[in-house]
Amino acid sequence: MENILELKNIVKSFDDKKIHQGLTFTLKHGETIGLLGRSGTGKSVLLRSIIGLEQIDSGEILFHEQRLDLLTEQQLYPVRTRISYSFQNAALFDSISVFENLAYPLFEHTNLAEAEVEKRVMEALQMVDLTESRDLMPSDLSGGMQKRIGMARAMILNPEILLFDEPTAGLDPVNIEMVIETIEKFKAQGISGILVTHDISTAKRVCDRILILNEGKIGFTGTVDEFEGSDDPFVKSFLL
Ligand SMILES: Nc1ncnc2c1ncn2[C@@H]1O[C@H](COP(=O)(O)OP(=O)(O)OP(=O)(O)O)[C@@H](O)[C@H]1O
Ligand SMILES: [Mg+2]
């Protein structure tokens, strides 16, 4: 499989606090990587670094061979339609409806006619099983529904890569199941993904490969089977 995203020797500190101390891995086309690690190991910072919301100190981030870490804010703008980031909180606009939240990126980044926008928004809502919520305000939705709308918005521009930051955190089992099914639909469309999570059962279900951050380095990388079968006490501590 072709590499879609390549990270080479990523180093990142905040003042004298070292976060990443040389991370190297690749994401292949159509693959979903589960990114695990204790709280504060820099999982969210890594996702933000990929789309240039954080500046890395050294290393290379390649998207289809293009160096993302060298791009200006303006050059990153179109990249963020192709690599979409689903935030740890849903980050919806509170003052506009669900429909308008989903239509916004389409009006912002495309020249689609209104009828086509409506069609795309309804398709996205269908993906997360929330078509009947189109005219509600974000405050009318449960936390789980807000997360699902956030996921629908993340895929509205047909991205090639989706970065999910803890999509199941704080959700009840029904909403967790719906989030998993949504991720499976993205996968079926050939979208690649990096899923940051503390939810091991979700990671095992939707990920092809597991990567664990530990003290600034990659503490483990392997398939889900290798992850589950590992004898390494460090890896096993995540399976408990
Ligand atoms: N803008 C920032 N300035 C200074 N320190 C930061 C900044 N953003 C993150 N950090 C620090 O970097 C470290 C890694 O943060 P990050 O949010 O990536 O952790 P995480 O692995 O996502 O944790 P969690 O599982 O709790 O979400 C933390 O110690 C955090 O305090
Ligand atoms: Mg985080």
Image (cartoon, rainbow, N blue to C red):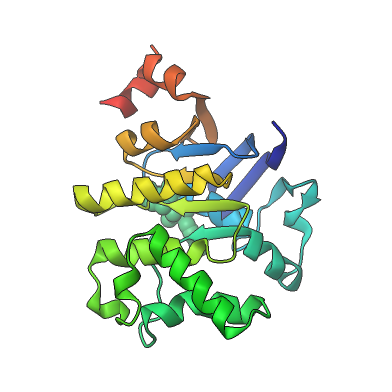
Tag count? 0
- Residue 48, by quadrant, is bottom right
- 234 or 225: nearer the viewer: 225
Name the residue rendered at 66%, 76% in the picture: 110
The location of residue 42, given as percent across then percent down, is 48, 47
Quadrant including the C terminus = top left
Rendering quadrant holding ligand 1: bottom left
Relative to residue 23, is residue 177 drawn left or right? left
Quadrant including the N terminus = top right
Residue 16 appears in the picture as rendered: no
Name the residue rendered at 52%, 61% in the picture: 155
- 56 or 24: nearer the viewer: 24
Name the residue rendered at 68%, 80% in the picture: 111
Name the residue rendered at 41%, 79% in the picture: 99
The location of residue 219, given as percent across then percent down, is 49, 27
**Residue 192, relative to residue 135: is it above or below?**
above
- Residue 79, by quadrant, is bottom right
The location of residue 107, given as percent across then percent down, is 59, 82
- 139 or 231: nearer the viewer: 139
Residue 136 appears in the picture as rendered: yes
Relative to residue 45, is residue 137 drawn left or right? left
**Residue 199, relative to residue 102: is it above or below?**
above
Give the residue furthest to the top.
231
- 12 or 49: nearer the viewer: 49
The location of residue 9, given as percent across then percent down, is 69, 38
Relative to residue 90, is residue 42 drawn left or right? right
Give the residue furthest to the bottom.
95
- Residue 100, by quadrant, is bottom left
Relative to residue 213, is residue 54 drawn left or right? right
